[in-house]
Image: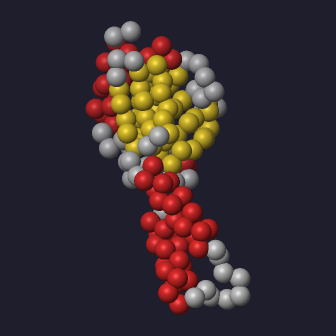
Amino acid sequence: MGIVVLALLAVLIRQLVAGPLGTDPAPNSFLIGMILLFLVIGVNFATLAIRVTIHGISVGYGIIRHHIPWGKVVGCRLDEASAIRYGGWGIRMSWAGGKRRLVYNIIGAPRVVVEKRLGTYQEFVFSTMKPEAVMKAINKGLGKR
């Protein structure tokens, strides 16, 4: 996202300083809008927050969150699938072992699979730099039900 923002910013500055390139330039307002849009998206997806509370598990990128109450959690395990399977970072939908998965993925981190009882997705997968600590917290939360 940063590269896109910098490229758009360069085009905008070029247009403001030296005039537009070609005969059909992008309007400055469009470039400013795109810069702001990509900045907001980049900031929103900059961090993946994981919270295991007395109410359940909450994982989210900025304002986009997924919450699973304890009553819908069956268990958890480390994801054995290759990171390539999910096609990059961000929010993905996938199938594994005949089950639908909702995936919140970052590149270069192991993933935890949360098995669910009900819902559109039978499994919720998310990346974490501390999978053992997260699975321990989830198992502790499951024991309190």
> Residue 56's spot in the image, x, y percent?
41, 21
Instruction: Let me know if residue 74 appears in the view.
Output: no
- Number of numbered discs overlaid on the protein picture: 0
In which quarter of the view is residue 130 placed?
top left
At 48% from the left and 63% from the top, the residue drawn is 1
Whole-percent x, y for residue 9 in the image: 49, 74
- In this rendered view, identify the residue nearer to me: 70 or 7: 7
Q: Quadrant of the C terminus?
A: top left
Using the image, determine if residue 8 lies above or below residue 69.
Answer: below
The residue positioned 46% from the left and 19% from the top of the image is 69
At 51% from the left and 69% from the top, the residue drawn is 4
User: Relative to the observer, which residue lies in front, 5 or 28?
Assistant: 28
Q: Position of residue 94 (x, y in %)?
A: 60, 41
- Looking at this view, name the residue that lies furthest to the right: 24
Residue at the location (48% across, 68% down)? 5
Residue, far top: 145
